[in-house]
Structure formats: C-alpha cells, structure tokens
Amino acid sequence: MEIKSFAKVNLYLEITGKRPDGYHELITVMCLIDLHDTLRIEFQPPVTRLSCNHADVPSDEANLVLKAARTFFQAIGRTDALTVSIDKKIPVGAGLGGGSSNAAAMLTALNNHYQQPLDKAALMTLAGRIGADVPFFIYGRPALAMGIGEDLTPFDNLSESPVVLIYPGKPLSTGEVYQRLNFGLTKSKKINTQIIFRHIRKKEIPALLHNDLEPPAFAMNPEIAHAKTVLLGEGAAGALMSGSGSSVFGIYPNPEDAHKACADIKAGYAHWDVFLTKLRTG
C-alpha cells in the first residue's frame, strides 16, 4: 500500500496561554499544501520495521508512525506486524508537521486496510493521543484550530493560492522556540476569530498572516527572517514562517509569478531548499 502524506502551513498562529501540563493554548489557521512524503506499507512481515531516506528521522518507537500503528492495533485488538518505508520530501524540523502528517497517513491507511473499523470521529480521537497536530491531518481540510490544536472548525472559501516555500537548511527545536517566547510581546497584532473568517470569506489571506513565534525563531536563526524578506522581495503578496519554523512560505497572486520567484530564489540561494507548491483546499 502507498499513501501520500501532505505538509501543512500555518496562515495564522497566536499563542494564548500555557496549560499546567506544558501544552500551549493557541489559535491557528492551518492548511495543507501539495508538498508531501510517501509512505509504503507492507503487511504481515515477521516483525515490524521502519526505514526512511532521511538520516534525521528515527526508525524506532520515537517515530510517530510506529506509535500510530501501535495505537491503532490496540484500539481494534490486533497485534499485526508491518514494514514501513518513508520517502521523505517534507523538510524535518521545519514547522510543516511532517511527523504528524506521517502518523495520520498511517492511521488512515490502516483503517482503510482493515475495512474501516473506526469512523472518522473515532480515528480523530485516536489521532489526538499521538500528537496535538495529528487530528488536523486526519481532518484533511483547511481549519481554524483552537485549544492545543484539537478543536477544529472548517472553512471552505480558501483559494488554492500558489506558494513558494523556503527551508533555510537548519531545523529549530520547537521546545526552545516556545521557551524563548515573550508573552508580553505577542499582543501587538491580534485578530479575533470573526475577523479571521471575514478575511477568509474575502480571500484576503495576506492580511491574515501572523505568527507569534517569529520573533524568538528569528533571534535563534536570522536566516529565517532573511528568507521572509527574500520572498517579499520576489513578489509574494504575503510571507510567514510556518509553525515554530524554520520554513517560510510566500503566497503568490498567480502561478507565473510563483514559478519565476521559485527559479530566482533557487538560483540565488543554492544552500536553501526551495519548493513550488500550492494551498490544498479539499
């Protein structure tokens, strides 16, 4: 079995507080993009094994894919073994949700293989036990997420805008980015949920773009801020760091401008990974 595992970007990210269990409360708008990994799954081998073409991806129980498989089998009362290989295209440690997406893809693949013993609501509940972002990838459509990311509200008027994505080549520690967050400095631009949906209805995505985690991430790696400046200089209608970084994406008005910007940035910054992609609305 082969299944695609799509990356996401955060079009808006506001940190509203920290819970006693260490999780941060947030308001975020998430959307899948076309950039994806590919999972290949073989059933009934002697033992479970996982491999990946990226050296920084663990092949043991630290990998969320194996946690997802174990959690699923426990839920349906099976102990089957699997061989899983991940063809990794989503940069690691980039704020694009690659690990969470892989876990959700595994849950979806297993549920389909075993004739859907779990409905979508049950599968999303199971996903929440694996990671805060995993339910969104099961959900599979643009969403406003609140709480720690598990409270999802759909929105349906988002256009499939062209996107140029830059990964500057160095991952960031999500924990360290959050540790450096100064809540006193995150109040400069807040958009309530009604305004968020108004921007979406009017397809005013560039006006929506905001991420509370940019200041600490920029301080940790100034090249992230430079990537954002480059995207804006190459004609992006708006640009933003995704999640806790270190990737930065630009929204473009048309595919031609996005294609030219992608080519120009690749030519000028050979040490960056640059991707031409688009928002996924369905």
Image: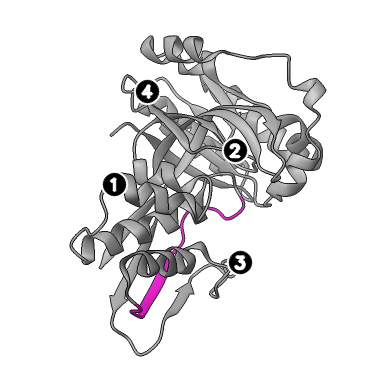
**Camera-nearest label, 1 or 4:** 1
Q: Is residue 212 magenta?
A: no
Give the distance between the C-alpha atoms of the residues marked 2 and 4, in whole angstroms: 24 Å
In the rendered image, residue 228, in percent from the top left (x then y), is placed at 64, 30
Q: Which residue is mark 1?
A: 120
Q: Amino acid at mark 2?
A: Gly
Secondary structure category for the residue under label 4: loop
Q: Residues within 10 Å of mark 2 (few under 14, many from 20)?
A: many
Q: Amino acid at mark 1?
A: Lys
Secondary structure, magenta segment, majority class: loop
Q: Which residue is mark 2?
A: 243
Q: Which residue is mark 4?
A: 254
Dots 3, 2 in contact, CB < 8 A: no
Dots 1, 2 in contact, CB < 8 A: no
Q: Amino acid at mark 3?
A: Asp
Q: Residue at x 34, y 51 (%)?
A: 123
In the image shown, does 19 or 213 lie closer to the viewer? 19
Comes first in the chain, label 3 or label 4 = 3
Q: Which residue is mark 3?
A: 56
Q: Is residue 89 magenta?
A: yes
Give the distance between the C-alpha atoms of the residues marked 3 and 4, in whole angstroms: 35 Å
What range of the chain is rendered magenta? 79-93
